[in-house]
Amino acid sequence: MVYRRVLDKLIILIISLALVFSAVSCGEASTSDVAQTTSGTSSSYHENTNQNPGKWYIIKDMSFAFKVPKDLKIKRAEKKGSYTGQNDRMKIAIKRWNRVSLNKLESLKALVKDYTDHKVKALRRGGRRMVKVLGYKKKIRYYVMAKNGDAYVFTITPNKEKHPKLKLKDIKKETSAIEKSFRSPKRVPKGADKVSISKSKFPKPDYLVLVNSSHKLPKGWSDKVDYVRAVNSRGNKIKVERKAYKEYLKLKEDLEKNDRIHIDIDYGLRTVKEQKELIKEYTDMYGASYVNRIAARPGYSEHHTGLAIDIYLIIKGKNIYLNEEMEKYPKTWEKIHSKLANYGFILRYPKNTSYPYEPWHIRYVGKKDAKNIMSVPGLTLENYLLRR
Ligand SMILES: [Zn+2]
């Protein structure tokens, strides 16, 4: 009898333990699955994600891919160059961001910080560089860098139309899964959906445009040109015409890899207003007579075109950008100048012309014309255009 009682007690103990365990695990399930507590209909969504790992999308022009829940379809948005997608729980918007062009994660972080005072975080996911902005306007934003240096903004928001009570933290599982999925298209399984963001509709500018002390910037020029923004090693924002910038990046890479020469852009596009300010600053620094010789009148600077670039040197990690400092490295400039034409650039003010020598001022004209000009020592753009 005694044994029987002990056995009974043991059985009761085992049953109650089992009950406690199941209760605990149930509790865990219902708290972790926020979807069930916030909206009844979305529980089926979670079942779906277990069976279907999601759908890959390759954004062609962005040169990266990402994965979203299978029921979320990405479609072209009304506005050109942007895409949207939604399912029961979330909305995604993708668009090209300011036609930014950057080649470093830190530059992207600095630029994003300029646009928002919210907490920004630089990330690397699957070989992609990105910056995350947390909680900005109750959204999660990712600025993802494409291979060509452009940045794209991904905005993820809870689908309030379907579920007004749904909060950002409720869709954290999905957002972090998308964040982790970012990678290059090469690492994406075949059969992924390809969506293509349309290229900018800017016409090709006249790369041989002449702007000098007697030729004013053509009217309406700035409206027709596709500029990219970047941040240099001194933390200054710069703007350059898209094609010229792309070629400049190749020149920079060539010099870094093969000659261990490091350069960056001091000035690219300079507006008429900025030219006025620069003249004032330079007059204080160098005096009026030097400025009159070297700086153009507002409206007459080649920098207004976005095709001219003033480069500076980075030597042993130090930025060398003052004219008198830069002039101390003639051999370095020689090497840089020898490679300009390969990327469509010319040295705009070479030695022994009527203009003062400016080793740092280069101008994009396109490869064919650059080779023609650079193969004749001392040939200026003015004289080249006269010969044609
Ligand atoms: Zn210049």
Image: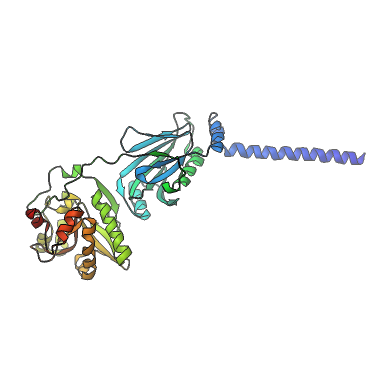
Res. 128 visible in picture? yes
Residue located at (13% from left, 58% from top): 295
- The outermost residue toward the right is 1
Residue 252, image x and y in percent?
A: 28, 59
User: In the picture provided, is 148 more to the left or to the right than 357?
Assistant: right
Instruction: Tell me which corner region of the image, top left, top right, bottom left or bottom right, holds residue 290.
Output: bottom left
Foreground of the two, 296 or 278:
296
Q: How many marks can you see?
A: 0
* Image color mode: rainbow
Residue 245, image x and y in percent?
A: 26, 52
Q: Is residue 302 above or below residue 287?
A: above
Foreground of the two, 48 or 286:
48
Residue 225, image x and y in percent?
A: 21, 45
Residue located at (88% from left, 39% from top): 5
User: In the picture provided, is 289 more to the left or to the right than 26?
Assistant: left
Q: Is residue 348 above or below residue 305?
A: below
**In the picture, which quadrant includes the N terminus?**
top right
Foreground of the two, 169 or 151:
151
Residue 265, image x and y in percent?
A: 25, 58
Res. 280 visible in picture? no
